[in-house]
Image: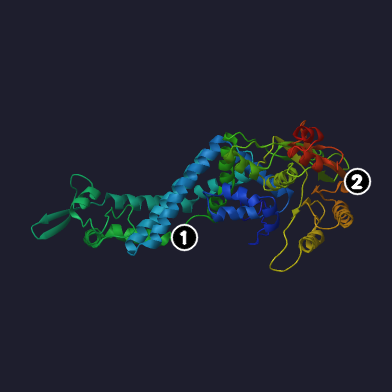
Amino acid sequence: MAEGFSILDLMESPHTDAPRPVFYLDLNLNQILDKVTAQWGNPVKKMFLYFPRNKECEDYRRAVYGDVKKAACHEALSHFLEVAEKMEENQKQEEAVISPMQKDVWHLWAIRHYCEAYGGLCKALEEMELSSEGMREFLRRLKEHLSSKEYLEMQEKVDATLTKLMECRFLITYEKDRMIISEGTAPGDYEAFMDQNGDRDRITLKSPFRISPNLSDLENACLEVLAGKRPEIFRGLAETAEKYQSFGEEFCFRFRREIPYYLSFRAFQAEMEQKGFHFCTPTVDEEKPVSAEGLYDLALAIVAHREGRKVVSNDFDYREGESFFVLTGPNQGGKTTFARSLGQLVFFTKMGLDAPADRANLHYYKNILTHFSVEESIETGRGKLKEELLRLAPMMEDSEENDFVVINELFTTAATYDAEIMGKKVLTHFIEQKCQGIYVTHLKELAYVHSGVVSLRAMLNEERLQSFRIARSEAEESACAANLVNKYRLTYEQLKERL
């Protein structure tokens, strides 16, 4: 475990601010992650832009997510975030107020909520059986921090100072044209008193030691009188705030920033499961074949459920010696959807999260490379074929062993003979690079390019209409034509009826 602890990374990843727009857009991941992080904001969304450094780091995340999914752990982490948000609100108020004394008050409340958040989380986690290295290491460090002499001294001093402040009371008495401020108490609470006697048209008055962005002139005057009568309390406030101006451990604050990565996806997954969609924890076992059952396109599922449409799932497996699927079949038969679902499966597995399938086993892939059909560029004046080639060239140059490749409908504007030659070169390149993947095409000849290629086909049902099922089958050139003939009722028998 590296010295700088992270609940996301077993070892530091070479993070950059550069997203992966190519495969994010091709696989519709942007639509999924917009939904996942809708309530969490851009800082959480950015965490989904970076793959862990290696397989060990992916396994590290997957184990942490396994703990996060446990009901007790999830509840403890959710409560932790609620209290931590109070701490952050205190810090915002500290920045917003003008009075130095009030800044000190808000600072101590921030420390109080820091202690409450991490102390409560530690107590809850100690009662659980944590499975992941990440959560166990975080708990070990947290216990060590919370039992340190420095932390215990800070907690005691802050609690004592806030207790004394909260015990301060003063009585405001109106006598004709005079207002007398003295120590003491009166029936009722401060807010009710100020609501009756304060300037309600201009200000909302609250306790100066509670929630109040800024004090009114009257409140400031009261506190000046009280500070003169009890200087030791206010001197203690200033000294305590100054002594603990910097508080907390970096690994604690980093945990607060990073744990929403898991919680955001868990909330999204739970919502989708309530709608009837299944997720699984993928295994990554190099000794077993790459396969999945009940795989579906998660982006499509989000939209389809909203529109009341059914989502069809599929199974697949790469058998010994197989590297690439070549998928052919009728238009609108689910080919692109299946290709996207494969890419999404690899993505969520690499991110250490659950995947949209009933069961899945993958091998370790370094990266995801995608190339989906593009439109002609009006700005550059380049045709569709040239746009595709310009994007394909760096993709092939950058490919490495163990990349996962998703290619969808390349070279559709080229002559069939040329498209076949170029398609064969592309497939051969990635197979020789020891990549795995899928190539969606209208060219059945590509299914026989290499011994590592497997022919898949989008199947038609008994009525020769799209079933959206993908299965191993010989490429069939007439599938698209037959599909269109049936769709528009142009069979011999149907035409004979109409004539």
Residue 402 seen in render: yes
Q: Quadrant of the C terminus?
A: top right
- Measuring from the top left, give residue 302's x and y in whole percent: 60, 42
Q: Label 2: few (<14), some or many (≥20) within 10 Å? A: some
Q: Earlier in the sequence, mark 2 or mark 1?
A: 1
Q: Secondary structure at mark 2?
A: helix
Name the residue rendered at 59%, 40% in the picture.
269
Mark 2 or mark 1: which is in front?
2
Name the residue rendered at 49%, 47% in the picture.
81
Q: Nearer the viewer, residue 279 or 171?
A: 279
Which residue bears the numbered disc 1?
246
Answer left or right for 222 relative to 130. Answer: left
Q: Which residue is at the far left?
A: 176
Q: Nearer the viewer, residue 91 or 462?
A: 462
Q: Which residue is at the far bottom?
A: 380
Answer left or right for 263 relative to 211. Answer: right
Q: CA distance from mark 2 to mark 1?
A: 66 Å
Which residue bears the numbered disc 2?
448
Q: Secondary structure at mark 1?
A: loop
Which image quadrant is residue 180 in? bottom left
Name the residue rendered at 63%, 36% in the picture.
277
Amino acid residing under circle 1: Ser
Answer left or right for 279 relative to 176. Answer: right
Q: Which residue is at the far top?
A: 462
Amino acid residing under circle 2: Tyr
